[in-house]
Amino acid sequence: MNRIMGTGKCRNRLIQLLRETLEWQSCWKELKKNKVWIVLSKEEKEEDIFVMTGTRPFRRPKKRPKNVKKQMDV
């Protein structure tokens, strides 16, 4: 086991990462158990997109190629 995990700083960091992963997994299970859904308004969604991309979202969807449009219409 020691050969696999290594020694010194690397081993300590690996142990720390394993502990953090286990903590994250337990938190995730708790969150999944207590499902809470928050509905965002159109303005809030627009603001989030602006923060992530730096531009306002498009008002109209992009025009699709004809073959894609035909597949969607079928």
Image (cartoon, rainbow, N blue to C red):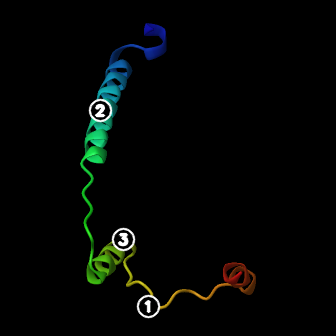
Distance (Cα) linking label 3 and label 2: 27 Å
- Left or right: residue 70 versus residue 32 is right
Q: Earlier in the sequence, mark 3 or mark 2?
A: 2
Q: Secondary structure at mark 3?
A: helix
- Measured as percent of width and height from the top left, residue 55 is found at 39, 82
Mark closer to the chain start, 1 or 3: 3
Q: Looking at the image, do the residues carrying marks 1 and 3 touch, with CB atoms under 8 Å apart?
A: no
- The label nearer to you, 1 versus 2, is 1
**Considering depth in this image, is 31 or 60 the residue closer to the camera?**
31
Q: Which mark is residue 28?
A: none
Residue that numbered label 1 is attached to: 59
Residue picked out by circle 3: 52
Q: Nearer the viewer, mark 1 or mark 3?
A: 1
Q: Is residue 73 left or right of residue 32?
A: right
Up the image or down, 65 lies above or below 32; here it is below
Looking at the rendered structure, the secondary structure element under dot 2 is: helix
- The residue pinned by badge 2 equals 20
